[in-house]
């Protein structure tokens, strides 16, 4: 199966899942992870209908940007762990950073965005299952991070992100997604006061 067939297959599965859940398929955004993909493969995915590309390695992001591999995509996101020493290479180059999980990183992203005179959209990453092998802040520390982000002038929190454990059965992750939704609602309520 070539890239375009894979993309169409994934989009059809998203459409079916959305309809089964009573949602409009257009509400769902496919973010295609481009990790270890060639420039040609990325271009083929975009030609097949991918509109958002997500890169998780700074070196690959920089190389793909230099090769104009993301041309035609509406957005490029950074979806991997971001080290503070690489913030300069990411801020302002992507539409959304998915992995801000500490005050130190939040301040580094804000500082670089300020130098560039822009506001960087971010997601706060939560380690919702408390797994040692995964990044993310604790559920208890995400509210203070969100409050700090609101005080800073050059970052905008667009939501929360989590990677739950790999399930034995798809339903096994439902409690983690429910916990994330409750956390989001709680933070939103506390910050609108």
Image (tube, rainbow, N blue to C red):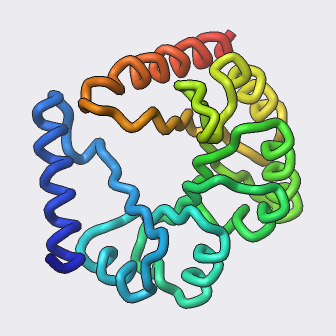
Q: Which residue is at a point 33% across and 22% down the rendered structure image?
A: 174
**Horizontal and vertical percent for residue 161?**
53, 37
**In this picture, residue 191 sits left or right of residue 26:** right
**In this picture, residue 85 sits left or right of residue 56:** right
**Horizontal and vertical percent for residue 115?**
88, 62
80 or 181, which lies in front?
Answer: 80
**Quarter of the image that includes the N terminus:** bottom left
**Horizontal and vertical percent for residue 171?**
26, 25
63 or 21, which lies in front?
Answer: 63
Number of on-image labels: 0
Q: Which residue is at a point 15% across and 47% down the rendered structure image?
A: 15
Up/down of 179 relative to 66, above or below: above
Task: Say if residue 27 shows up in the picture.
Answer: yes
Task: Say if residue 124 shows up in the picture.
Answer: no
**Quarter of the image that includes the C terminus:** top right
Q: Which residue is at a point 35% across and 26% down the rendered structure image?
A: 173
Q: Which residue is at a point 42% across and 71% down the rendered structure image?
A: 73
**In this picture, residue 105 sits left or right of residue 192:** right
132 or 63, which lies in front?
Answer: 132
**Horizontal and vertical percent for residue 134?**
60, 40
Up/down of 85 relative to 40, above or below: above
């Amino acid at each position: 199966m070539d890239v375009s067939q894979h993309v169409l297959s994934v989009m059809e599965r998203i459409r079916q899942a959305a309809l089964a859940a009573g949602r409009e398929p257009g509400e769902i955004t496919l973010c295609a992870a481009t990790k270890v993909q060639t420039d040609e493969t990325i271009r083929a995915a975009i030609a097949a209908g991918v509109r958002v590309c997500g890169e998780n390695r700074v070196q690959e992001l920089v190389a793909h940007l230099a090769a104009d591999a993301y041309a035609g995509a509406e957005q490029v996101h950074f979806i991997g762990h971001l080290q503070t020493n690489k913030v300069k290479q990411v801020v302002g180059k992507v539409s959304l950073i998915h992995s801000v999980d500490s005050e130190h990183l939040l301040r580094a992203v804000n500082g670089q965005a300020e130098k560039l005179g822009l506001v960087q959209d971010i997601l706060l990453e939560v380690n919702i299952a408390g797994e040692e092998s995964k990044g993310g802040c604790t559920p208890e520390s995400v509210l203070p991070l969100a409050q700090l982000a609101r005080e800073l002038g050059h970052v905008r929190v667009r939501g929360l992100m989590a990677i739950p454990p790999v399930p034995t059965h798809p339903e096994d992750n439902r409690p983690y997604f429910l916990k994330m939704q409750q956390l989001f609602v709680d933070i939103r309520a506390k910050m609108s006061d």
